Image (cartoon, rainbow, N blue to C red):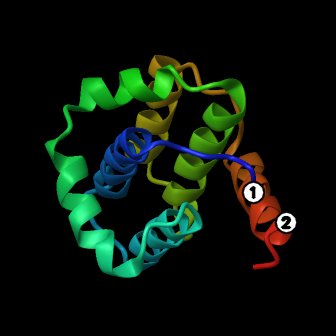
Amino acid sequence: MNIRFSEGELMAIAKLANAMIAADGKVMEQEMESWKMEMERFGIAKGSFAEIFRESERIDFVEALGIVSGLDDERKKYVGAFLGALMAVDGHVDEGELKLWQLMSIFCDLPTMTVGEALEYMAGLSADNGE
């Protein structure tokens, strides 16, 4: 994968991911594992996960939306797909999660896609990386 993010961009993505994970009122192990795998994809060590999570919680949500909205189209597609796949990883898409994904997509100008397209995009990244 040739997509790269700065530390600040990763923190903003983590902030949005944290919101998506919490959107249905429960934190599932599959969601956390998916989140960790994506952070590892960008070179964040497993041991740094807790620190990244804490730091991302310090970022204002509106600031995170602004950072993500400034990304180029390729990286916005990744963020949209990642958030869509994250909400579906537990096998159930809650209406609250879907609404949050739609709102984040609007505020960040992320490309429109279905949950199936998000999952397909993320699976393609894993296949491209031999995962």
Q: Which quadrant is the C terminus positioned in?
A: bottom right
Task: Say whether residue 130 is left or right of residue 52.
Answer: right
Disc 2 vs disc 1: Cβ atoms closer than 8 Å? yes
Considering the numbered disc 2 on the image, is that residue within a helix, a strand or a loop?
helix
> At 75% across and 69% down in the image, what residue appears?
126
Element at badge 1?
A: loop
At 39% from the left edge and 72% from the top edge, which residue is drawn?
Answer: 32
Residue linked to disc 1: 1
Q: Which residue is mark 2?
A: 128
**Picture coordinates of residue 19, whole percent (x, y):** 31, 47
Quadrant in which the N terminus is drawn: bottom right
Residue name at image x 79 percent, y 70 percent: 129
Residue 89 position, x and y percent, is 55, 67
Kind of residue at badge 2? Asp
* Count of numbered tags: 2
Residue nearest the viewer, comparing 22 with 2: 2
What residue type is disc 1 on?
A: Met
